[in-house]
Image: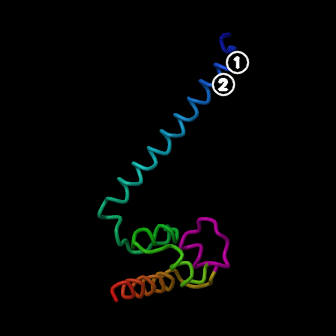
Amino acid sequence: MSRPSPISRWLVRAGFASALALTLFFAVRLIMGAIYWNDPSKIDQTPAGWMPVGYVARSWEMPRDVLIDALDLASMPRRRRTLEHIAEDRGIPLDTLVTEIMAVIEHHREARRD
């Protein structure tokens, strides 16, 4: 039986190192996310201009799609846009958008209670 060539050994080692690096990367992301969202100060945060819609939805423990549909954001680009940018695009003050968001959140929570 012949020994594997140096190139094939190198490829196996490189593949293993790549798989290990990806595993570590995603493990660290998972742990950091768990630590971040377990902080009580991150729960039910008042929406601010720097927050994207997904952050607000996660903070208030509601599906992101519910918030997107209620605010009619489906027609807007899907990139991570802050509430401040969304308010600018809609031509309304940020406070008005925050009021709309809080109404959607309250309606969603009441619907879940029933």
* Disc 1 from disc 2: Cα separation: 6 Å
**Horizontal and vertical percent position of residue 36:** 37, 56
Q: Residue at x 53, y 73 (%)?
A: 83
9 with respect to 29 (left or right): right
Q: Which residue is mark 2?
A: 11
Q: Residues within 10 Å of mark 2 (few under 14, many from 20)?
A: few
Q: Residue at x 63, y 65 (%)?
A: 79
4 with respect to 33 (left or right): right
Q: Which mark is residue 110?
A: none
Q: Which residue is mark 1?
A: 7
Is the residue under label 2 in contact with that under label 1 (CB below 8 Å)? yes
87 vs 2, nearest the viewer: 2
**Horizontal and vertical percent position of residue 62:** 43, 75
For the residue marked with disc 2, what is the amino acid? Answer: Leu
> Does residue 101 lie above or below 42 as drawn?
below
Quadrant housing the N terminus: top right
- Could you tell me which secondary element the residue under label 1 belongs to? helix
Q: Quadrant of residue 106?
A: bottom left
> In this view, which residue lies farthest toward the front?
1
Q: Residues within 10 Å of mark 1 (few under 14, many from 20)?
A: few
**Horizontal and vertical percent position of residue 8:** 68, 20
